[in-house]
Image (cartoon, coloured by chain):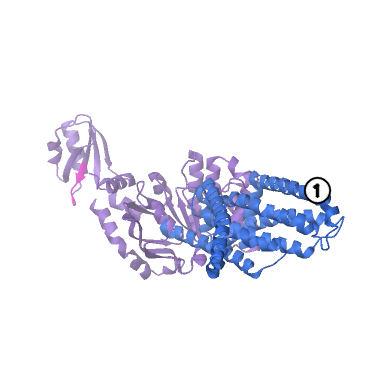
């Protein structure tokens, strides 16, 4: 997994790269050297984050990796032990109120007043976010419609299902059209249809806002995020674009299925095969040498020796492999 | 923005049954004690008429009623305040406020204003009773004004103390009991300490401790006296507790 280590190692340089880019002005969130200690425990250890307008970043990591802590710091709900955060160029610690106007935050537990109706709650949220009086009604209506809450506007939040409550939580995060939307596990507890809807909504939000979302669902990240960041023990261990991820790991090997498999050594003898491991009874994982493509030779050998070839496919390393690899390495 | 927050708190209070219950019980107890005192006054009136300068109905009936009201507030305010910070933190709804563009000062002052708004309603309802007496006679409006101002200041100090205690824990009932304990300690110990220090001739120390004895300060108002030192003491206690609550919430952000 050397390539992902490279990616992590290259990360501290990324703000510099951004500064050199022509559209550096579109950076909506910039965090540098962010650390947080709880007593002797280091929850977040000097991470750097950068978010551009229109980008959806997926934040991954096992439980206790520091995702929520990081999000709390980014939204000004927790003071970092070290580091700086600026939102749309406004320092979060020097001008917290001004910076927070540009942030929408859905915490792990949606901050819902269960005794209010959806409309009352959103009207309160829009006022708290200092939206000008004349724009409030439109902002509430737009957020309600975007989150599919129009039909339940007059219902008490307490009577709504978990999925709808989650939507109300998202609605309060986007009601003031913030530049940065930070969602902590937005699809938790939703049914598959709702998950698809919320994903569509997040994708849509990515158009005008920047979104950071944390999740445990890896396919979710692959389907809606532009970039992935993986945290482990408070460190950022992986940071790359989804397409970069595919490029890195897409052709790292082959999967070979044979009905009558020979000894592994017979496969190793074929030119271009660097290593062979048995993935299942009749399924082999072939590591490919750098410059020779063994595909033709494998097919020819299989036909010649009657191995009964039934599958030959690129062994795509999924995000899941990267995730498992990065976050279990220390345990093993 | 403080007004928005205050309106939100007031609405939250009136949505819950607690506020209505407090209003009903308060009104019942105050009404009962008011009528009982009025009845006693009417029976005593023939003897009182023989005195050269008889005390009026305001001093004999209304002032003690306000004293009772202050004592009931001592029980009621912690119950009303427990929701405001402790319960919001427990339900994690505080995040809605802390991730909005608001300072901690605004949040605490908004909550305080909401609670004070409710207490003003309570005090207004109490004040309706002496005002009713004007239908059958005259009352001392000067004394009544002193009583109302004194009760408002005392209620404000109770509210501030209770809000500060509410910010110390995420357990609402714990916050209410603790706030009640602190207020009771202030009333009982504060008073005793002030008297004790004064007897020993330590005037300066007694004056300082008087800040911590809200009901002691309220007493001068029941004599029709708007005593500037008592007023300062009550305001000082209120502001100190509000500042402590703001600091406490700021510290939570630092501590996590």
In the image, what residue occupies the spot 82% across and 63% down? B53
Residue A313: percent from left, percent from top: 28, 40
In the image, what residue occupies the spot 61% across and 68% down? B232
In the image, what residue occupies the spot 62% across and 47% down? A116
Of residues A316 and A319, which is closer to you in this image? A319
Q: Is residue A289 magenta?
A: yes
Q: Does the magenta stretch include residue A30?
A: no
Of residues B54 and A156, which is closer to you in this image? B54
- The colour with which the image depicts chain A is purple
What residue sits right under mark 1 in the picture?
A: B39
Q: In this view, does A81 lie above or below A22?
A: above
- Tell me the quadrant of the picture where the C terminus of chain A can be found: top left
Image check: A65 left or right of A252? Answer: right
Chain represented in blue:
B
Residue A78: percent from left, percent from top: 43, 58
In magenta, the rendered stretch is A286-291
In the image, what residue occupies the spot 31% across and 63% down? A12
Image check: A300 left or right of A126? Answer: left
Examine the rendering and report whether any part of residue A101 can be seen. Answer: no
Residue B225: percent from left, percent from top: 70, 66
């Amino acid at each position: 997994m050397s390539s992902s280590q490279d990616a992590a190692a290259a990360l501290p340089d990324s703000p510099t790269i951004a500064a050199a880019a022509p559209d550096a002005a579109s950076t909506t969130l910039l965090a540098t050297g962010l650390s947080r200690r709880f007593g002797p425990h280091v929850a977040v250890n000097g991470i750097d984050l950068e978010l551009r307008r229109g980008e959806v970043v997926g934040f991954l990591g096992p439980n206790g990796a520091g995702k929520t802590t990081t999000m709390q710091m980014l939204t000004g709900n927790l003071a970092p032990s070290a580091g700086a955060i600026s939102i749309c160029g406004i320092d979060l610690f020097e001008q917290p109120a001004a910076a927070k106007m540009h942030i929408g935050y859905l915490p792990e537990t949606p901050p819902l007043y269960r005794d209010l109706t959806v409309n009352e709650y959103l009207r309160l949220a829009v006022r708290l976010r200092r939206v000008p009086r004349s724009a409030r009604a439109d902002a509430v209506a737009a957020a309600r419609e975007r989150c599919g809450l129009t039909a339940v506007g007059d219902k008490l939040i307490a009577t709504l299902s978990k999925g709808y409550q989650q939507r109300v939580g998202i609605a309060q995060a986007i009601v003031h059209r913030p530049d940065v939307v930070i969602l902590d596990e937005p699809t938790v507890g939703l049914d598959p249809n709702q998950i698809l809807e919320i994903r569509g909504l997040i994708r849509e939000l990515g158009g005008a806002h920047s979104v950071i979302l944390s999740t445990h669902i890896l396919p979710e990240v692959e389907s809606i995020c532009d970039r992935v960041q993986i945290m482990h023990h408070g460190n950022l261990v992986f940071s790359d674009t989804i397409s970069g991820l595919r490029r890195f790991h897409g052709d790292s090997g082959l999967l070979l299925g044979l009905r009558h498999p020979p000894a592994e050594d017979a496969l190793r003898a074929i030119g271009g095969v660097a290593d062979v491991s048995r993935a299942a009874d009749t399924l082999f994982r072939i590591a490919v040498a750098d410059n020779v493509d063994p595909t033709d030779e494998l097919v020819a050998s299989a036909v010649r020796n009657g191995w009964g070839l039934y599958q030959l496919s690129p062994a795509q390393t999924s995000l899941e492999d990267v995730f498992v690899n990065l976050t279990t390495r220390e345990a093993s | 923005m403080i007004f928005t927050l205050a309106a939100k708190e007031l609405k939250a209070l009136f949505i819950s049954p607690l506020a209505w219950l407090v209003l009903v019980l308060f009104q019942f107890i105050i009404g009962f004690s008011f009528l009982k005192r009025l009845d006693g006054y009417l029976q005593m009136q023939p003897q009182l008429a023989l005195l050269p300068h008889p005390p009026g109905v305001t001093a004999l009936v209304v002032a003690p009623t306000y004293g009772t009201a202050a004592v009931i507030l001592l029980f009621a305010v912690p119950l009303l305040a427990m929701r405001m910070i402790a319960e919001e933190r427990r339900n994690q709804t505080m995040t809605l406020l802390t991730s909005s563009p608001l300072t901690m000062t605004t949040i605490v002052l908004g909550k305080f204003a909401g609670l004070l708004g409710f207490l003003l309603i309570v005090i207004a309802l109490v004040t309706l009773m002496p005002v009713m007496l004007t239908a059958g006679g005259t009352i001392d409006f000067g004394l009544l004004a002193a009583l109302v101002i004194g009760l408002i200041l005392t209620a404000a100090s109770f509210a501030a103390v209770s809000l500060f205690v509410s910010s110390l824990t995420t357990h609402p009932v714990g916050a209410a009991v603790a706030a009640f304990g602190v207020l009771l300690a202030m009333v009982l110990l504060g008073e005793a300490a002030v008297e004790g220090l004064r007897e020993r001739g330590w005037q300066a120390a007694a004056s300082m401790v008087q800040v911590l004895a809200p009901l002691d300060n309220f007493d001068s108002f029941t004599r029709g006296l708007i005593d500037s030192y008592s007023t300062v003491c009550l305001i000082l206690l209120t502001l100190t507790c509000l500042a402590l609550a703001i600091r406490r919430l700021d510290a939570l952000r630092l501590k996590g």
